[in-house]
Image (tube, coloured by chain):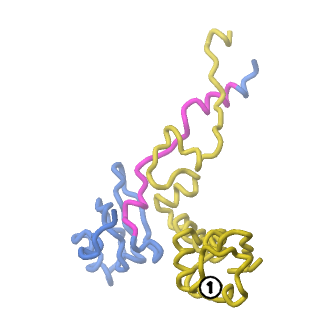
Chain colours: A blue, B yellow
Amino acid sequence: MSRSLKKGPFVDPKLLKKVLAQSRGAEQPIKTWARDCTIVPEFVMKTFLVHNGRDFKKVYVTENMVGHKLGEFSMTRIFRGHSGIKKTEEQQQAPK
Amino acid sequence: MPRISGVDLPAEKQVKVALTHIFGIGHALAAEILKKAGVDGNARTKALTDEEVGRISSVVESGYTTEGHLKRTVSQNINRLKEIACYRGMRHRKNLPVRGQRTKTNARTRKGPRKVVAVKRSIKAMS
């Protein structure tokens, strides 16, 4: 279900404050845990370090990303392939 | 055989059905279009006068995205998701379900036919 329009997009107030404060200063990545924060036009051209549960992924916000959430760009899972696949390859290569 | 919205040639069917042969028009939209154009949907397509065909095609072209244009819009949207490297984009790139469905089983529409992984032989069989 989509969010009610009455409320407007959810933007983490603290994060927004930080972004606005930074507007003209030296651009430094902003570390944040607010994965649920919607990307608003003010965030464009900024770099965020978005927590994924383990470490912070660098996210450079472009215009296309407006309307998405920060968390969508910081993957929380690493897929390293299925078990077994590597073993069968080794078996095939090894002489019988 | 009238042509509406570019390449489409609806056949010897009722107009309301024939219109659904256009990509981007289903039964609901077909009914809506026919109402706007003031054409009886139960009539056979071959029985349409040129003037009626003209009215239908002008309604379709003025208010609806269909066929190539619609296909392009859809693939542009998907490409946008892929480019910005968001979660949904990554799922598209990997040809996996995008909307959070399970992938432990099923998901064959996206994954395609089953790929059989060679069965690991037991130690006894190898010796």
The tally of labels here is 1
- Quadrant of the rendered structure where residue B57 is? bottom right
Farthest residue, direction bottom: B51
Instruction: Residue A46: say if magenta.
Output: no
- Quadrant of the rendered structure where residue A41 is? bottom left
Residue B25 vs residue A75: left or right?
A: right
Residue B106 at x, y = what percent?
53, 41
Please tell me how crowded label 1 is: few (under 14), some (14-19), or many (20+) other residues with Cα within 10 Å.
Answer: some
Q: What element does badge 1 sit on?
A: helix
Residue B119 vs residue A46: left or right?
A: right
**Which stretch is magenta?**
A68-91
Viewer-closest of B14 and A34:
B14
Instruction: Residue A82: say if magenta.
Output: yes
**Residue at x 31%, y 66% (from the top left corner):** A37
Residue A72 vs residue B43: left or right?
A: left
Viewer-closest of A10 and B108:
B108
Q: Is residue A83 above or below residue B4?
A: above
**Residue at x 72%, y 27% (from the top left corner):** A92
Residue A81 at x, y = what percent?
55, 39
The quadrant of the image that shows the N terminus of chain A is bottom left
Q: Is residue A56 above or below residue B65?
A: above
**Residue at x 33%, y 69% (from the top left corner):** A38
Name the residue type under label 1: Glu
Residue B126 at x, y = what percent?
68, 13
Viewer-closest of A22 and B24:
B24
Residue B33 at x, y = what percent?
56, 80
Residue for badge 1? B61
**Residue at x 60%, y 83% (from the top left corner):** B39
Q: Which of the chains bears the disc numbered 1?
A: B
